[in-house]
Image (tube, coloured by chain):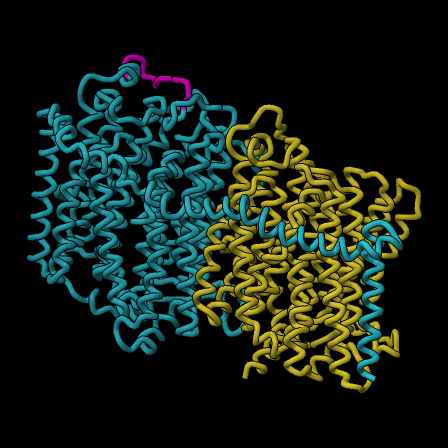
């Protein structure tokens, strides 16, 4: 079997799993549904590995396989195949997605145990994985858009999974609509690609692009790339399309872990990497990607430092880390960007899992101000949180250290104005250390809070009344929301397995790409980026190590500074907050992103709607109608003397009119 | 064969009018099923590259050159099938609920089907006009007699509005049709055969005024901006099963008319007024979308979303581009398939909540996961999520318009984002959020499921392979578009 056949199997299993669980939800025992869900993803992972093995057997220059099932649509020369494109980059994504998904499915198997919507959850989650795999395996831009939109749909369905919560449904709607805006960007990009190049399949597009766009930065090439970026930014929660991600935390925590941290939100990075031949022909657009990434990574960092909702802190950190990835693919550090994508998937999924464990123990309270003393209450979760935070802040030796600093190194290696990405990257790294360890230092040490104490004393988590963490309203647990015995925290085996494997990967995952030693990722991805002059450039090994040393210092100093802030001198944060009140207000209100979008887009459309509804329709449309009716009525008045009733006059008028016209025309034509 | 399809509904309609009351529904149901079987046979036997097929051509009124001439080609084949499909659940749904004066109701409904099929099958311009006018009459009675007064709108006032508008459109079109025949004949033998008329070619000057006579009738029927004044009231009062077929199929006859009559017979005028038509279409998209965005009544959300969708379809047709026109035709089928289940779902929701306003609704998914999933699929198709056949329709339309006018394509694409909002809102406000008191979250019954699910399955099959439709339509549509393209050169 060749790599493409394995690729189809990768797609098949999650889709089958989703349909099977969805179709048999009435009869299937819950646990079985969970096992089918896990099995489908693990099978996809195994097929992904088989595809890699098969592909690695080929010589480097022919490591890309296309295959098509049938012609999806073909009209007027615009022919779309239901086809996949298997190359090192798509398989890299397949392995990251299915690998992390498998672990998160195992975690969910336990975490969602008492949820009334257990089947629905696994059906959706499998569907999400299918969509994500379709996105990365698609062989042309139209099929990419299909995967892209399905992912958005799955994300919507899972954000509003607890659909009785109005906060959740509203968040789902917001995520969906913003993602549709991104889809439109992609649709227009695909249309423009077809118009300029006459093809839509990846291979053909990348082959023809350099022939058509002979000078750099031709405006059509730039336009294509900018439209692609609209889609990429919307999906990856980059500014100004970022506002949905924090609200998406309304979904169950495994969803935040899988979709809103490890996989879906990195789709934009994949898209830029996949379309690198276009972006290299339009360097201006690539710069836009990098600059937006930089701005997002800094802005999100400032927000993550001040918000107090545990999941939202991690969500903003996700935005910030994806900003790094955009910087990477924007400046041409492709393998570094995808390396960071992978390590980020490990440690961010881990952090969310550990956070889920804490939140479960807190009876759903997510405010870190309320959490204390979890080091004693849940040592395993505490260890995982620490590992996650170390990797996130780039502590020497952890996976995040290798990947983040490789991006920054490349920026300073390119030199010139690209230095700002290095400087911004270091500032971002310092903020990362602060917000990561702010979590650690605030919730782990100290005297246990009420819930933690309860856990220590009884060995069981608090069974509080389920409330909506966003509003404090009491939850309706009958449908779609976990019942009281939901709170199983870290005792559950599935959760422990998921967390420990990811903890291990977060710690040592970076060892695959040690400068001058292993560099597995770079070599693996090389065939995909073989035509890129940028990918061929590398900082020397000694420069890379110098960069790593700088990164290590910043990370350690950042962690120490955070320790001083929250443990050494706990009064300082409050003083800072008071001294810099306007800045704090700006940060804690998320730079007013929601308000700006509301003001610029939502209100005008609503206003237009109100105008159409209250002014335009009554006066213009109905005026037109009323006026017409009045004219006809008065004209029909004469007719009505002969016969009464509207229909009769209608028929009569028609008959008389017809005859008159026919006669006139006949006479004239004689 | 086509005559059989055409008259079967009428015959069964008469039977259901005459048989005892309790058999009326059975007779009507049998009629729709027989029609569906015949239409399916025709669609299966259809040769994509065979041009006009199953032709019936009999002289009817020799002095006036009017022939009873039927035929089917790539443009009409799936619209005929859509008509055959849509009426089955409409009759079944009415039968399952019962209605007063059942025989008369089914008779009217089936007369409507014959007239609609006639409009799609007619190859003689005056025959087309005749069926086009006949189409609205049974619906006038269906809405007027069986409609209910809602929101201060009485059924009679709504139908008067509707009929007045149609009257104007019909008269204009009739004049236009006669003029086409007479002017083309130029003193010679009168003919209204559409192919001959297209062949003969009208003088450009005549085309320019006749174009608007037809366009007015078609735009009114869709309806398009700004000729949609009759639509909200008619939608408010109409009985839902009748409204389902009305919105799904009758609105398409207008768009079909452009492809069948206007583009081939008035190519110069089409070319000349292309931009005007594109702007009308664009205005329909924006106006329909923002109104659907604002309204809370489920019928009106669907009604205005139809306006927006028909706007997209018109946009595709007047892109005068192969991809645009094929996308438009695909979208006619898709939209028809979406609207029938959507209105039946509205009826089911109304049965559960006693209301059709989404304001106070919510939570219906609670005990009804299957119902919720069906509605979710319909919603996603309505907002043309990529992966649905609706998306392919829109994609080709946008592609066609993009090649014609980039600015219009970009503005039109904002309609896609608004559709995402209003369609999803409709789903969310009914199915999600807390369940208010007094609402009954009941699972969809097997009987109702059987009416809706088959259409949903068709949607899913088309999602996997929209080429099933495009493959059959492409040749005919391309030929039609080519006529206007030649005119442009």
Residue A238 appears in the rendering: yes
Question: Closest to the observer: A270 or B124?
Answer: B124
* Left or right side of A201 for B256: right
The stretch in magenta equals A456-467
Residue A134: x and y in percent read 43, 55
Is residue A520 positioned above or below B421 on the image? below
Point out the image quarter for the N terminus of chain A: bottom left
Is B235 in the magenta?
no
* Left or right side of B382 for A568: left
Residue A562: x and y in percent read 12, 32
Is residue B255 positioned above or below A253 on the image? below
Image quarter of residue B177: bottom right
Residue A477: x and y in percent read 48, 24
Is residue A250 positioned above or below A50 on the image? above
The residue sitting at 68% across, 37% down in the picture is: B152
The yellow chain is B
Question: Closest to the observer: B345 or A88?
Answer: B345
């Amino acid at each position: 079997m060749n790599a493409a056949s394995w690729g189809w199997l990768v797609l098949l299993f999650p889709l089958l799993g989703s349909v099977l669980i969805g179709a048999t939800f009435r009869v299937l025992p819950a646990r079985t549904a969970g096992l089918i869900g896990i099995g489908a993803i693990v099978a996809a992972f195994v097929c992904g590995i088989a595809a890699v093995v098969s592909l690695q057997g080929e010589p480097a220059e022919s490591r890309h396989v296309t295959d098509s099932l049938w012609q999806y649509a073909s009209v007027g020369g615009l022919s779309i195949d239901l086809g996949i494109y298997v190359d090192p980059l798509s398989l890299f994504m397949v392995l990251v997605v299915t690998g992390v998904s498998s672990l998160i499915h195992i975690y969910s198997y336990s975490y969602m145990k008492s949820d009334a919507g257990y089947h629905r959850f696994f059906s959706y989650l499998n569907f999400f994985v299918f969509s994500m795999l379709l996105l990365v395996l698609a062989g042309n831009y139209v099929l990419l858009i299909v995967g892209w939109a399905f992912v958005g749909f799955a994300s919507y369905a899972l954000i509003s999974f607890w659909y009785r919560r109005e906060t959740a449904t509203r968040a789902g709607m917001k995520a969906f609509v913003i993602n549709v805006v991104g889809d439109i960007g992609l649709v227009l990009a695909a249309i423009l690609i077809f118009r300029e190049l006459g093809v839509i399949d990846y291979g053909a597009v990348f082959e023809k692009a350099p022939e058509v766009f002979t000078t750099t930065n031709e405006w059509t090439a730039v336009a294509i790339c900018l439209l692609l970026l609209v889609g990429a930014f919307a999906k990856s929660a980059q500014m100004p399309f970022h506002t949905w991600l924090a609200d998406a935390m309304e979904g169950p925590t495994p969803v935040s872990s899988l979709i809103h941290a490890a996989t879906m939100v990195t789709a934009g990075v994949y898209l830029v990497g996949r379309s690198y031949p276009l972006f290299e022909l339009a360097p201006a657009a690539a710069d836009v990607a990098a600059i937006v990434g930089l701005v997002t990574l800094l802005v999100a960092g400032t927000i993550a430092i001040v918000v107090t909702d545990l999941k939202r802190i991690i969500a903003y950190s996700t935005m910030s880390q994806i900003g790094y990835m955009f910087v990477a693919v924007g400046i041409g550090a492709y393998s570094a960007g995808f390396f960071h994508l992978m390590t980020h998937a490990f440690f961010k999924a881990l952090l969310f899992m550990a956070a889920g464990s804490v939140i479960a123990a807190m009876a759903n309270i997510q405010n870190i101000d309320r959490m204390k003393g979890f080091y004693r209450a849940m040592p395993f979760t505490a260890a995982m949180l620490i590992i996650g935070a170390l990797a996130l802040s780039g502590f020497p030796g952890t996976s995040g250290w290798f990947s983040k600093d490789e991006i920054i190194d490349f920026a300073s290696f390119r030199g010139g104005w690209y230095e700002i990405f290095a400087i911004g990257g270091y500032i971002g790294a310092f903020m990362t250390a602060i917000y990561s360890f702010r979590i650690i230092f605030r919730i782990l040490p100290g005297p246990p809070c009420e819930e933690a104490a309860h856990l220590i004393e009884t060995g069981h988590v608090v069974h509080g009344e389920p409330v909506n963490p966003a509003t404090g309203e009491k939850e309706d647990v009958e449908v779609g929301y976990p019942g009281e015995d939901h709170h199983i925290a870290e005792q559950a085996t599935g959760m422990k397995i998921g967390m420990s494997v990811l903890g291990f990967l977060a710690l040592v995952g970076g060892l695959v790409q040690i400068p001058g030693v292993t560099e597995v990722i770079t070599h693996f991805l090389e065939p995909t980026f073989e035509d890129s002059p940028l990918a061929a450039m590398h900082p020397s090994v000694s420069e890379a190590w110098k960069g790593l040393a700088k990164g290590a210092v910043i990370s350690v100093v950042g962690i120490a500074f955070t320790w001083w802030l929250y443990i050494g001198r706990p009064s300082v944060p409050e003083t800072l907050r008071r001294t810099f009140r306007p800045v704090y207000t700006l940060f804690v209100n998320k730079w007013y992103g929601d308000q700006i979008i509301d003001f610029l887009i939502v209100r005008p459309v609503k206003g237009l709607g109100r105008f159409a509804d209250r002014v335009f329709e009554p006066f213009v449309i109905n005026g037109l109608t009323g006026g017409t009716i009045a004219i006809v009525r008065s004209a029909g008045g004469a007719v009505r003397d002969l016969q009464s009733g509207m229909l009769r006059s209608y028929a009569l008028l028609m008959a008389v009119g017809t005859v008159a016209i026919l006669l006139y025309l006949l006479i004239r034509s004689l | 064969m086509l005559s059989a399809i055409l008259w079967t509904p009428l015959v069964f309609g008469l039977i259901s009018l005459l048989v005892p009351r309790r058999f009326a529904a059975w007779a009507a149901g049998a009629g729709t099923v027989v029609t569906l079987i015949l239409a399916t046979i025709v669609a299966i036997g259809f040769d994509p590259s065979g041009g006009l097929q199953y032709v019936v051509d009999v002289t009817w009124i020799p002095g006036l050159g009017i022939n009873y001439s039927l035929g089917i080609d790539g443009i009409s084949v799936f619209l005929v099938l859509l008509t055959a499909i849509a009426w089955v659940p409409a009759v079944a749904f009415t039968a399952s609920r019962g209605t007063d004066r059942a025989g008369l109701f089914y008779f009217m409904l089936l007369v409507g089907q014959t007239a609609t099929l006639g409009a799609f099958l007619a190859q003689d311009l005056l025959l087309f006009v005749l069926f086009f006018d006949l189409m609205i009459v049974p619906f006038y009675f269906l809405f007027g007699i069986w409609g209910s007064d809602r929101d201060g709108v009485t059924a009679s006032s709504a139908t008067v509005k509707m009929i007045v508008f149609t009257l104007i459109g019909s008269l204009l079109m009739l004049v236009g049709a006669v003029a086409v025949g007479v002017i083309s004949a130029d003193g010679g033998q009168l003919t209204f055969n559409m192919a001959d008329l297209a062949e003969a070619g009208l003088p450009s000057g005549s085309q320019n005024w006749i174009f608007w006579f037809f366009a007015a009738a078609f735009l009114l029927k869709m309806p398009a901006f700004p000729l949609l004044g009759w639509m909200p009231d008619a939608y408010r009062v109409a009985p839902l099963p009748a409204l389902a077929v009305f919105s799904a199929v009758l609105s398409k006859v207008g768009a079909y008319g452009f492809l069948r009559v206007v583009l081939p017979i008035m190519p110069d005028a089409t070319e000349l007024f292309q931009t005007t038509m594109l702007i009308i279409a664009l205005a329909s998209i924006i106006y329909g979308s923002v109104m659907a965005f604002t309204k809370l009544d489920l019928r009106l959300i669907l009604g205005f979303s139809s306006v927006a969708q028909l706007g997209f379809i018109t946009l595709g047709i007047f892109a005068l581009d192969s991809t645009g026109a094929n996308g438009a035709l695909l979208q006619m089928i898709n939209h028809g398939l979406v609207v029938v289940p959507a209105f039946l779902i509205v009826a089911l929701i109304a049965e559960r909540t006693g209301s059709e306003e989404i304001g106070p609704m919510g939570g219906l998914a609670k005990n009804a996961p299957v119902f919720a999933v069906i509605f979710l699929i319909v919603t996603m198709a309505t907002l043309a999520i990529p992966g649905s056949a609706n998306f392919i329709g829109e994609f080709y339309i946008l592609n066609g318009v993009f090649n014609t006018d980039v600015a219009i394509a970009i503005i039109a694409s904002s309609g896609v984002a608004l559709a995402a909002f209003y369609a999803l809102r409709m789903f969310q406000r009914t199915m999600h959020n807390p369940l208010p008191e007094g609402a009954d979250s009941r699972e969809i019954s097997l009987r109702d499921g059987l009416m809706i699910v088959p259409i949903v399955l068709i949607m899913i099959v088309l999602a996997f392979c929209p080429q099933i439709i495009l493959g059959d339509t492409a040749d005919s549509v391309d030929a039609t578009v080519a006529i206007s393209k030649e005119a442009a050169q």
